[in-house]
Amino acid sequence: MSPISRGFGGRRRPVADPSRVPPGQYVTPDFPVLSAGPTPHTPLDEWSFTIHGAVEKPVSWPWDEFIALPSETVTVDIHCVTKWSKLDTSWKGVSVDTLLENVETEAEYVTAWSDGGYTTNLALEDVTGGRAWIAYEYGGEPLEPEHGGPARFVVPHLYFWKSAKWVRGLTLTPDDQPGFWENYGYHNHGDPWLEQRYQGD
Amino acid sequence: MARAAIPRRLTWQLGRVVELIDETPRCKSVVVDLPEWQGHRAGQHVDIRLTAEDGYQAERSYSIASAPEDAHLVLTVERLDDGEVSPYLTDGLRPDDELELRGPIGGYFVWERSLGGPLLMVAGGSGVVPFRSMLRHWAAGEHDTVPRLLYSSRTLPEVIYQEELTRFSADDGVDVRLALTREWPENWEGHRGRVDRGFLEEVAWAPAERPLVYICGPTSFVEAVAQTLVDIGHEPGRVKTERFGPTGT
Amino acid sequence: MEALDGNAIAGALFEYFGTEMTVARGACAYCGATAQIAELRVYGQAPGTVARCRSCGNVVMVLVSVRGLQKVHLSGFRLGD
């Protein structure tokens, strides 16, 4: 164990309600930017969101139609696998339930994919039942590119690497297909309350 | 001697803070005594690790500001307002505090006499830190060419090592050129505004002299300067870059 | 978020390989462009660090610390080419 650096505390903040903080996490007032590559800049007139793969019929929305869909504003806590948690973050977007309303599928898994090539895998039951959104506003403002704008996946009950930035679609799959970080050792499920950070946890 | 500073193992060492020196309102030099230090090459860096009482750790890299010939290891740290580590190093440390670090690290962005010259160093902000190590190392030995340092800073008070650079210029003939990008004194005779192609053409050695070029600073600065120098005709293989994080907290 | 370069992963690579790696030269497995590791475009610290080819942008190296153990995935970079 390293010697203590006298007087060093880092950026953490004490929490009034520790039951909101999963094991091994600390609360930060910041919103750190972590990325695996350059920030994409897809013009809105070239943007679309697509649901395809193991579905009866793929469906796709251009930007104007997407933001005209019924939307929700939610306030949620988010938890990054790098141990920071941010409480009471506010997002506006379209629920995945809304997007899947007319989609027929027997698939049990999805892969979220993004501009720039990022992917992440989730169980279909983890993104339905009011647990996931495609969000285009954060904190009441249009989502900034460095935080995933124009739109990102938001799945707050799982570690935030599952909330793919710059998301462009969901591919429904019969089997669980490890995405980018999952291929390098991160957990296929990623429940912060069970500390499922790495494969085998 | 040149190869001495690749450690056989990269282990965390415990140093003791000897002195803290105010360089500019935002920058402080930390002088560290390290019993296990095996020496270093100019341009290398160290990783610093801080540990809180509950075991939380944060790690950052800092260029070594001291020359291999200097008595103590010196790091110069710029305090970033929203930083996690830098404010601790500039404002939290006291003499006799312990500091955990490992190094020296890096084999690419290094200069030593055997590499030759002529030497051109281009610094953006705190990117000047490794160049102080290189200049001190150059001055400590025999030399037949004189280095040039082009140093871009937002304002004059933010120029680090101002007195030492003036001495290098006056006593050793080092060609030090300052570019102030945001604010400058009324009678400022140095470059005003950002480093551009015209200024680089004026200050840099001509491509025919085949200088060894080192560029260090924020990513956008480094990339713009490197591209311009290549456009001017300098060999890409003789241009070395080290990008600092934009916030580098 | 601006990228850094291979100098930023020098310490992690030294720890993994037991030697200085940033001067090591290799070729991008996607486009063939050669570079020293110091010249790669480096993103992020975690969940992992990604190094990309400066020419084509493809991922050539990924560093992940799994349960405190550093792993380096080099499949996109042919060392020594």
Image (tube, rainbow, N blue to C red):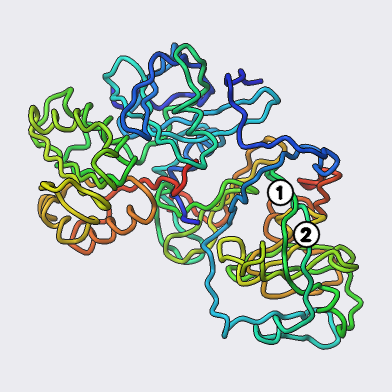
Residue at image location 15% in from the left, 40% down from the top: B176
Residue A7 shows up from this direction: yes
**Alpha carbon of mark 1 to alpha carbon of mark 2: how far?**
11 Å
The answer to whether the residues at label 1 and label 2 have Cβ atoms under 8 Å apart is: no
Query: Which quadrant would residue B125 be assigned to in this image?
Result: top left
Residue C13: percent from left, percent from top? 52, 39
Secondary element under disc 2, as helix, strand or loop, is strand
Q: Name the chain under label 2.
A: A
* C25 or A73, nearer to the observer: A73
- Residue located beneath label 2 in the image: A75
Q: Is residue B9 left or right of residue A121?
A: left
Residue closer to the observer: C80 or A143: A143
- For this view, does B58 lie left or right of residue A49? left
What element does badge 1 sit on? strand
Q: Is residue B192 left or right of residue B25?
A: left
Can residue B3 be seen from the camera position used here? Answer: no
Q: From the image, tell me which residue sits under label 1.
A: A86
Return the x and y of residue B27 as percentages of the image width and height: 36, 32
At label 2, the amino acid type is Thr
Name the kind of residue labelled 1 in the image. Answer: Lys
Q: Residue furthest front?
A: B186
Disc 1 or disc 2, which is closer to the eye? 2
